Amino acid sequence: MTEKTLFLELWHHANLYIDKAYCPYSNFPVVCALKTESGKIVGSCNIENSSYSLCLCAETNAIMKAISEKKELITDLLVYAPKLDYCPPCGACRQRIAEFSDDNTVIYMCKSNQDYKTVKMKDLLPGQFSLQQDSTTT
């Protein structure tokens, strides 16, 4: 599968959730679709709460759905926010993605015209927190 074909598959799946985003406070809908190592695609949207710290990002929702069904690595993840070109995952979501991916997981950040940029997880969150001990420091 080519990168563009995979992007279009993730794009289509993510956009199934655009009207389901619950964002009455920020009016900033965000959708996400991810692909796991077995090829399963999972999508979701952001869901806000009047107690703002309880809001859930689209990426978080998609990750939790995917991992609760089968714990496996995320190979690709797309984020799209119609009101912001190339919307990157927030810091908390970067750490959540890192927990269930590897350095080569591809993150797609999109514009409304299906233009996109990609970044590898290792470049999106260098020095990510992990309980795994780094063998180069021992």
Image (spheres, rainbow, N blue to C red):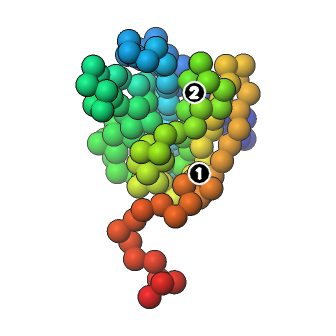
Horizontal side of residue 94 vs 25, given as left or right: right
Q: Which residue is mark 1?
A: 124
The secondary structure type at the circle numbered 1 is: helix
Residue name at image x 26 percent, y 25 percent:
51
Horizontal side of residue 18 vs 63, given as left or right: right
| Tag 1: amino acid | Leu
Instruction: Measuring from the top left, give residue 100's x and y in whole percent.
Output: 42, 53
**2 or 1: tag closer to the N-terminus:** 2
Residue name at image x 65 percent, y 32 percent:
86
Say if residue 26 shows up in the picture.
yes
Work out whether 113 lies above or below 62.
Answer: above
The secondary structure type at the circle numbered 2 is: strand
| Tag 2: amino acid | Tyr
Instruction: Measuring from the top left, give residue 50's x and y in whole percent.
Output: 27, 19
Horizontal side of residue 130 vs 79, given as left or right: left
Residue name at image x 67 percent, y 19 percent:
112
